[in-house]
Image: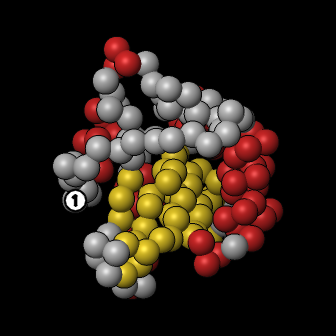
Amino acid sequence: MDGPRIEQATLEDLPQLTELLTELFTLEGDFVPDPTRQMRGLRMLLEQPSRGRIFVLKQNGAILGMINLLFTISTAEGGSVIILEDLIIQREYRGHGLGSRLLDYALDYAKKKDFKRITLLTDRVNAEAQRFYKRHGFFESAMLPMRYVLTEDAGTHAPDQSRL
């Protein structure tokens, strides 16, 4: 049995990646899982590598976790930045440092490619995720994330205001 290794995701990984995102979106208050949408978004990213990267942690062909990095440009930073869109480890493999391995890999990748910043969103009520990211050097921004949904089928919903 080989140890887990990190590699760039490929189109062949789509079914497993979609399953992971379905699990992630059941945990997040702002999103509703929709495997068709998730697969479409993943495919777009995999087919357009200039827009980002998906790295996976694999063991014997099975994906144990994934991290999705989207590339954009910040006028404030005067250079390229990353939006960390998704980080998920399969439930049965959590608590063994695999999420840290993936995140550390992404941070190293970003430094080597001269990105200026990584921004992410996490649920306000997910204290465990917030602690995880803070342990890795992330901090709360003074910025308030806001969203405008352009299509009725966007797969998001207004958050439960009682949780805010």
Q: Nearer the viewer, residue 59 or 67?
A: 67
Circle 1: residue type: Gly
With respect to residue 29, does 151 lie above or below?
A: below
Crowding at mark 1 (Cα within 10 Å: few <14, some 14-19, many 20+) = few
Residue at the image position 69 percent from the left and 56 percent from the top:
42
| Residue at mark 1 | 137
Image side of residue 74 versus residue 2, left or right: left
Residue at the image position 57 percent from the left and 70 percent from the top:
52
Image spot of residue 9 (x, y percent): 66, 66
With respect to residue 48, does 42 lie above or below?
A: above
Q: Is disc 1 placed on a helix, strand or loop?
A: loop
Q: Quadrant of residue 100?
A: bottom left
Quadrant for the C terminus in the image? top left
Quadrant for the N terminus in the image? bottom right
With respect to residue 30, does 119 lie above or below?
A: below
Residue at the image position 65 percent from the left and 75 percent from the top:
49
Image spot of residue 111 (x, y percent): 35, 80
Q: Nearer the viewer, residue 20 or 69?
A: 69
Image spot of residue 59 (x, y percent): 63, 58
Image side of residue 18 versus residue 105, left or right: right
Q: Quadrant of residue 116?
A: bottom left
Image side of residue 65 versus residue 127, left or right: right
Q: Is residue 111 visible?
A: no
